[in-house]
Image (cartoon, helix red, strand yellow):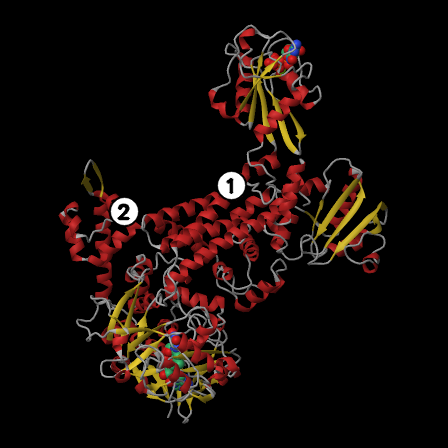
């Protein structure tokens, strides 16, 4: 018997869980099929969510109705706001999570979502009928029909892990790879690349001597991703900081000739920004120490994750090197670090909705599109789930702009820049960074939240309420006057002074009671109002740039345009444009090989109609 | 005639980029000269050439970029002219397209016939700047280079020519690109600090950052200063001769230009309309303007002439204010607003000098005899060439647009400095630096909003 679903999601990682949840909650009967349903949203690497720019992504996922933010908040064992010494635009929340609980909580949510059917199975084939996809087939021979299929395979497609000279097919250590599906996509005409990533060893906490390390606690006040946040948090644990030294580096260096990275056994491209420890000692040979964090894996385990020590050197080299690190003299490894190579399908093969260009109704998301990181995966999974559901209902896809969300920047970068190494989010990738802050996520996304429809009306009302209070505060600030020695100025002018804040109790006497009452009622709204006054000049300027950006985005390029006959374009631009057919002039301008002069040519053509 | 018709068409240059349209224009100045060059660019440039010459096989026999002899014929095979021809294959031409050039005898009638024939064969008259625009659009030059070509065409003085030549070779572009590179470098430092603050990288050194920014500011200021010099070289300095009636302004004007262009007469109020003449001194173009004498009691047309003279003075880089040293009447002073750009000149020193004026700091000349004229020229040059003139013809700003961009970039940097000093986050400084880099990018065409493009290409002359 063949069962039939509206949407089939293949893979139960971070992307898959978001996709399935969004699709089911938007009313689609959804099959979530994954190799091991007990490993839903398992954190392959670091037991932490958020961090620089990634924290923004999580808050956006949460705002749009995704799961990652609330699962993180419910399982966090340490949370912090990073970059606090800098301006609020680049603050980013980060949380250390209990790895086991994270997966369990996610499992609970998925199993209790009406409309999701969770099944075990390895998908090896996309069933198709001419140019149509009609369903999927598993290794054990089951077939499922689906109107839409979302593929979110993570690091599992033709996964191959390496430790020193040893290698073995696996998606993660001790987990089977997914074989066959990637080859099937190639047979369907898709183009693939090979990327790699790595992870550090896991250590036995009982063998660690913390007295030789520095303790690092989270922020005293919880830092939440979700809105509304949970009522309570788990007990909090510290992290511990230690350093590698010259001796460590010496040992690591002695093992380089057996490193799969340096012997050429690994063919895939790794991320430059997240180098392995062996990479670090080669590339930054002048540094005599590197920071290493001991991060707890959970409340019920003694296991520690050694952040900063990603490696694929032979196990005995890893261990010998670790024994030179203060606090780790007697350490025993529960599991060595390793590297994994896997297949990716460059994202220029999908549309901004994440639907395949060449195969309608087939969506790709997550690590397989060339990103790295749970947050990047979750963001894409959510969008793929939303857009699969929308396309079933005949609605236009939701495509976020670079001026609206980090998610918009992420997907636009993927499809226009065609990353040649694993892509992770940075705040500097967002040209409108000052506007895309983590503190105003709900407010700036409000129209999209309404459009998507995953948030209950109550939440939408609350966001609207927050916006109203924010503008009330702004109005009060611009109309009220503050009397100082010898002069009277507007409250806004006073607030613009670097040392002045609405939250400083010593200055409370300067504000009127209605204003103070509003600040007390909704500190978040007051924070946003204050920030917008303090940075007014900069924000206004960014808005001007947003206008210019939107003008370019508004020039839509005809879908049937034949670029090959446009002799005035550079050869490279002609080829790229013909292949990708960007939707707008703005998109075209960000494609590699398309120069300002090519854009000028297109602009002229569009003007002539 | 067809040419005038096509010429007067208000055909914006943008119709040129559609694939294959072939454009034609006379590349040498209009009027009778010994030689005229006709230039053709576009897909059909070679086909049209084949139809225009009696020996189309020469196109096969001769290599591109080599001159060959050709007989130019009309539609009936009648000989129009014997001249030279050269052709280019894309992308190895000025415009990056197929192209050809014909060297003809410079008779207007003959050129008209050749152009007519080419139009019959499918070419269209180029709009102003279209050749350069195509070169730009085909990636043959960046914006600063394209502008420099326009300057080169217009350049008359040797200094202007030198600057324009440098610019076409990309000296300005290189200089801007270097400064922009430094800016981007500074941005990168900051971004590293923001996005990798959890990686225990060495802390950002604000000291070095300040230094880098100050250095960039200094270089941009130099560039901004070079503008006045660049503009002078391009447009020439305007030197206006003014003063009371009959003090000898026109005589001096004639002495300076070396010909009797302005009317000289003992009756006051001789000069009414301004008279202008252009000279080249030390490679710099000087535009001398003689004006009507100014007196408080003038009425009617005389008053109008005074007003006109005062208006002319407004546009001056330097005002030569002339007084008659032999006169008994107290000399009138130039309006104070010109204090910073006036040179006081005492004329008629060949006559007896009024003893009351002897001590005044006038530069003494006799327009009539020519005594002191050499010194006057020197004084003029010293005043119109800005200080630190040490050969800054390299990478000089010559365009208002460039100056604007540099000034905006400077404002951005100042802003950033202020923010940083006021304790603002470095993410704000990053914003200012990014913006400054974008402004500089505009000069070399890395970011080119269409209005900038349009503005640039509208002041080209046909055929370039
Ligand atoms: C060793 C290692 C190191 C890493 N290091 C980093 C790092 O340093 N920094 C960083 O940001 N990120 C790192 N990651 C990446 C991070 O784990 C991923 O980015 C993230 O998990 C991707 O989410 P996803 O949903 O796309 O895929 P995954 O979380 O990988 O989930 C994919 C799921 O799909 C299932 N699946 C796959 N194919 C099939 C199939 N054919 N049929 C059925 N089920 C299938 C798998 O079983 C798995 O459950 C690392 C991952 C690994 C394995
Ligand atoms: N002796 C002597 N006569 C001069 C000199 N310069 C000008 N003159 C005479 O002064 C008279 C006026 O000269 P212009 O050059 O016409 O004077 P102007 O200032 O142009 O007069 P307006 O145009 O009427 O304002 C003429 O007769 C000139 O010959 C000079 O240096 N020496
Ligand atoms: Mg006169």
Read off the residue under disc 1: B224
User: Could one spot residue A428 in this view of the protein?
Assistant: yes
Q: Is mark 2 within 8 Å of ligand 1?
A: no
User: Label 2 is found on which chain of the structure?
Assistant: A
* Image quadrant occupied by the C terminus of chain B: top right
Q: Quadrant location of ligand 3? A: top right
Residue A215 falls left or right of residue A31: left
Q: Which mark is residue B108?
A: none
User: Which percent across, then down, holds residue B93?
Assistant: 70, 54
Q: Which is more toward the observer, A375 or A290?
A: A290
How far apart are the alpha carbons under marks 1 and 2? Answer: 32 Å
Nearer the camera: disc 1 or disc 2: 1
Q: Residue at x 27, y 74 (%)?
A: A239
Q: Which of the 4 image quadrants contains residue A294?
A: bottom left
Q: Chain of mark 1?
A: B
Whether residue A466 is situated above or below residue B28 in the rendered picture: below
Foreground of the two, B120 or B148:
B148
* Residue B53 position in % (x across, y down): 82, 52
The spot of residue A339 in percent (x, y) is 43, 81
- Residue shown at the point (48%, 49%) measured from the top left: B439
Task: Please tell me whether mark 1 sits on a helix, a strand or a loop.
Answer: helix
In the rendered image, the residue lying farthest to the top is B328
Is A594 left, or right, of A463 in this rendering?
Answer: right
Mark 2 residue element: loop
Please, is residue A199 above or below residue B124 in the view?
A: below
Where is residue B261 shown, x and y percent of the image? Answer: 69, 20
């Amino acid at each position: 018997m063949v069962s039939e679903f509206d949407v089939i999601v293949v893979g139960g990682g971070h992307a898959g869980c978001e996709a399935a949840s969004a699709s089911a909650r938007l009313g689609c009967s959804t099959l979530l099929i994954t190799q091991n349903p007990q490993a839903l949203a398992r954190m392959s690497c670091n037991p932490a969510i958020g961090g620089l720019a990634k924290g923004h992504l999580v808050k956006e996922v949460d705002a749009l109705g995704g799961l990652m933010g609330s699962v993180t908040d419910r399982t966090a064992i340490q949370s912090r706001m990073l970059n606090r010494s800098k301006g609020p635009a680049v603050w980013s929340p980060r949380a250390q999570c209990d790895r086991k609980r994270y997966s369990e909580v996610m499992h609970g949510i998925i199993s209790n979502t009406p409309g999701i059917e969770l099944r075990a199975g390895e998908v090896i084939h996309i069933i198709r009928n001419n140019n149509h996809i009609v369903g999927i087939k598993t290794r054990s021979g089951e077939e499922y029909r689906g109107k839409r299929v979302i593929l979110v395979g993570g690091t599992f497609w033709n996964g191959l892990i390496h430790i020193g000279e040893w290698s073995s097919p696996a998606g993660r250590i001790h987990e089977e790879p997914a074989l066959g599906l990637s080859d099937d996509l190639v047979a369907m005409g898709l183009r693939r690349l090979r990327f790699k990533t790595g992870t550090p060893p896991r250590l036995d906490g009982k063998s660690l001597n913390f007295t030789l390390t520095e303790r690092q606690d989270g922020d005293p006040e919880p830092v939440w991703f979700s809105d509304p946040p949970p009522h309570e948090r788990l007990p909090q644990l510290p992290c511990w900081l230690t350093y590698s030294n010259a001796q460590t580096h010496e040992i690591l260096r002695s093992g380089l000739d057996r490193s799969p990275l340096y012997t050429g056994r690994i063919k895939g491209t790794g991320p430059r920004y997240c180098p392995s420890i062996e990479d670090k000692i080669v590339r930054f040979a002048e540094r005599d120490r590197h920071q290493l964090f001991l991060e707890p894996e959970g409340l019920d385990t003694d296991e520690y994750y050694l952040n900063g020590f990603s490696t694929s050197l032979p196990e005995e080299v890893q261990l010998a090197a670790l024994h030179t690190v203060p606090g780790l003299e007697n350490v025993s490894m529960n599991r060595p670090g390793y590297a994994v190579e896997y297949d990716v399908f460059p994202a220029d093969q999908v549309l901004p909705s994440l639907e395949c260009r060449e195969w309608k109704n087939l969506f790709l998301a997550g690590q397989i599109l060339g990103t790295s990181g749970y947050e990047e995966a979750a963001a894409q999974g959510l969008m793929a789930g939303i857009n699969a559901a929308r396309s079933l209902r005949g609605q236009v896809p939701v495509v976020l702009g670079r001026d609206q969300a980090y998610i918009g920047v992420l997907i636009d970068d993927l499809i226009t820049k065609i990353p040649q190494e694993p892509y992770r989010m940075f705040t500097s990738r967002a040209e409108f960074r000052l506007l895309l802050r983590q503190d105003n996520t709900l407010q700036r996304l409000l129209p999209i939240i309404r459009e998507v429809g995953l948030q209950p009306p109550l939440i939408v009302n609350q966001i609207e309420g927050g916006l109203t209070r924010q503008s009330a505060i702004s109005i009060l600030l611009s109309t009220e006057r503050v009397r100082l020695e010898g002069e009277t100025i507007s409250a806004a002018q006073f607030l613009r002074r670097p040392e002045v804040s609405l939250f400083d109790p010593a200055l409370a006497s300067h504000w009127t009671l209605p204003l103070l009452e509003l600040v007390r009622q909704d500190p978040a709204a007051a924070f946003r109002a204050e920030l917008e006054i303090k940075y007014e000049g900069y924000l206004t300027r960014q808005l001007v740039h947003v206008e210019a950006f939107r003008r370019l985005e508004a020039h839509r390029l005809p879908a049937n345009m034949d670029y090959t006959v446009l002799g005035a374009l550079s050869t490279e631009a002609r080829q790229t444009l013909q292949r990708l057919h960007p939707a707008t002039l703005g998109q075209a301008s960000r494609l590699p090989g398309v120069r300002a002069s090519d854009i000028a040519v297109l602009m002229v053509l569009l003007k002539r109609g | 005639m067809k040419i005038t018709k096509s010429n007067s068409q208000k055909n914006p240059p943008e119709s040129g980029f559609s694939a294959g349209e072939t454009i034609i224009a006379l590349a040498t100045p209009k009027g009778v000269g010994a030689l005229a060059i006709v230039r053709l660019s576009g897909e059909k440039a070679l086909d049209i050439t084949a139809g225009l010459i009696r020996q189309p096989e020469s196109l096969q026999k001769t290599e591109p970029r080599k001159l060959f002899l050709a007989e130019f014929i009309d539609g009936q095979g009648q000989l129009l002219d014997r001249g030279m021809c050269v052709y280019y294959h894309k992308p190895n031409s000025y415009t990056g397209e197929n192209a050809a050039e014909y060297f003809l005898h410079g008779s207007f009638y003959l050129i008209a016939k050749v152009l007519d024939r080419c139009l019959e064969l499918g070419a269209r008259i180029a709009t102003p700047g279209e050749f350069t625009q195509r070169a730009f659009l085909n990636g043959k030059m960046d914006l600063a280079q394209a502008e420099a070509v326009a300057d080169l065409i217009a350049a008359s003085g040797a200094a202007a020519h030198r600057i324009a030549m440098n610019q076409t070779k990309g000296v300005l572009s290189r200089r801007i690109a270097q400064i922009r590179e430094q800016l981007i470098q500074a941005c990168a430092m900051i971004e590293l600090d923001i996005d990798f603050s959890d990686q225990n990288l060495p802390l950002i050194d604000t000291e070095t950052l300040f230094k880098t920014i100050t250095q960039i500011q200094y270089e941009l200021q130099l560039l901004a200063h070079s503008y006045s010099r660049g503009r002078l070289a391009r447009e020439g300095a305007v030197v206006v001769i003014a003063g009371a009636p009959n003090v000898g302004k026109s005589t001096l004007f004639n002495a300076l230009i070396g010909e009797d262009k302005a009317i000289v007469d003992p009756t006051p109020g001789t000069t009414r309309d301004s008279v202008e003449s252009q000279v080249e001194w030390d490679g710099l173009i000087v535009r001398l303007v003689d004006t009507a004498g100014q007196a408080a009691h003038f009425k009617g047309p005389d008053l109008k002439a005074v007003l006109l003279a005062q208006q002319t003075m407004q546009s001056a880089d330097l005002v030569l204010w002339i007084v008659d040293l032999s006169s008994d009447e107290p000399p009138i002073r130039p309006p104070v607003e010109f204090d910073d750009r006036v040179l006081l000149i005492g004329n008629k020193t060949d006559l007896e000098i009024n003893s009351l004026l002897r001590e005044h700091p006038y530069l003494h000349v006799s327009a009539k005899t020519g005594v002191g004229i050499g010194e006057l020229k020197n004084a003029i040059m010293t005043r119109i060439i800005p200080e630190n003139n040490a050969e800054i013809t390299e990478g000089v700003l010559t365009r208002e647009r460039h100056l604007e961009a540099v000034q905006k970039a400077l404002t951005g940097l100042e802003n950033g400095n202020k923010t940083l000093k006021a304790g603002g986050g470095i993410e704000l400084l990053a914003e200012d630096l990014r913006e400054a880099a974008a402004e500089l990018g505009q000069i070399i065409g890395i970011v080119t909003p269409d209005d900038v493009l349009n503005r640039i290409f509208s002041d080209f002359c046909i055929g370039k």
